[in-house]
């Protein structure tokens, strides 16, 4: 009987190691370094809509998604939710707290039932002292998040919603066989997509309607059928090959 908890703990640790190994931040660590990081981790399950942390709360660590989707967002002065990014397995987020942030700079909540790996801030900082290479991985991950944030701000500032949505679709659609419509399922709800694009759900619905009326798109539930890539390309103002 006493062996059961040990076996369960071993399974959890194995699952943590598998997720960390897939994460860009930890992918090329040695087995020894990866095991050291895993020892500083715990897991947490989140129900749909459950808050992981709130803006201004004391920062205890950063996270890696094991399953589900986590929305990192802020609340605008008029009370709207502005989604900064949606993270899925095996992406990491909130690494900024390892540098100077004493509190979380945004909110995080589960969009669907999710599980995350919690990497303890104090223990990870101790690991960096003995494994300096971890600091480079941390900086690389933070740089990617900063690049995404800058791109998002540029889109909000300089693009109309038609351009933003067209560019988003082109980024997610895969080329179809000649003569066939290119289709894909929305990786998130339309409400969340609206938040990412910085508009209301109503504005997003009207934009989808314009795309349908122009013959560029057909929407069936959560599936988008792209009928005219060239038209979307002209709306997005970005080369199709550069997406």
Image: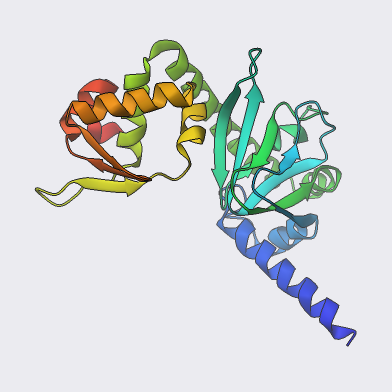
The answer to which of 110 and 151 lies nearer the viewer is 110
Question: Can residue 8 be seen from the camera position used here?
Answer: yes
Left or right of residue 111, residue 237 in this image = left
Marks counted in the figure total 0
Residue 238 seen in the current view: no
Q: Nearer the viewer, residue 160 or 134?
A: 160
- For the N terminus, the image quarter is bottom right
Rendering colour mode:
rainbow
- Give the x, y percent position of residue 144: 54, 34
Q: Nearer the viewer, residue 201 or 7?
A: 201
Q: Position of residue 84 (x, y in %)?
A: 57, 28
Task: Name which residue lies at 25% across and 21% down.
Answer: 235
Left or right: 47 as drawn, with respect to 177? right
The x and y percentages for residue 226 are 23, 39
Residue at point 73%, 67% (across, down) = 13
> In the image, what residue occupies the spot 77% across and 59% down?
36
72 to 62, vertically: above or below: above
- On screen, residue 74 versus residue 163, left or right, reads right
Kindly identify the residue that appears in the image at 60 percent across and 21 percent down. Answer: 80
Q: Quadrant of residue 141?
A: top right
Quarter of the view holding residue 93: top right
Q: Residue furthest left?
A: 179
Assign the C terminus to one quadrant of the image. Answer: top left
Residue 191's spot in the image, x, y percent? 50, 33
Kindly give the residue lying farthest to the right in the view shown. Answer: 2
Asked where in the image residue 74 lies, by quadrant, the reply is: top right
């Amino acid at each position: 009987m006493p062996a059961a908890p040990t076996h369960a703990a071993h399974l959890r640790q194995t699952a943590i190691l598998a997720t960390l190994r897939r994460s860009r931040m930890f992918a090329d660590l040695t087995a020894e370094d990866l095991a050291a990081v895993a020892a500083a981790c715990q897991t947490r399950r989140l129900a749909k809509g459950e808050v992981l942390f709130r803006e201004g709360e004391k920062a205890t660590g950063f996270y890696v998604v094991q399953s589900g989707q986590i929305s990192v967002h802020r609340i605008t002065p008029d009370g709207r939710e502005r989604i900064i990014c949606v993270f899925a397995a095996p992406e990491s987020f909130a690494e900024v707290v390892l540098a100077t942030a004493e509190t979380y700079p945004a909110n995080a909540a589960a969009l669907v039932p999710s599980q995350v790996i919690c990497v303890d801030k104090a223990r990870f900082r101790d690991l960096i002292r003995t494994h300096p290479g971890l600091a480079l991985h941390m900086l690389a991950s933070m740089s990617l998040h900063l690049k995404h944030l800058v791109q998002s701000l540029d889109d909000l500032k300089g693009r109309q919603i038609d351009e933003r949505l067209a560019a988003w679709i082109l980024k997610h659609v895969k080329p179809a066989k000649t003569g066939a419509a290119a289709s894909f399922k929305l990786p998130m709800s339309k409400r969340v997509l609206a938040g990412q694009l910085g508009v209301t759900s109503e504005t997003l619905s009207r934009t989808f309607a314009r795309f349908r009326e122009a013959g560029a798109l057909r929407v069936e539930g959560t599936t988008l059928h792209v009928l005219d890539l060239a038209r979307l390309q002209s709306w997005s103002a970005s080369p199709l090959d550069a997406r």
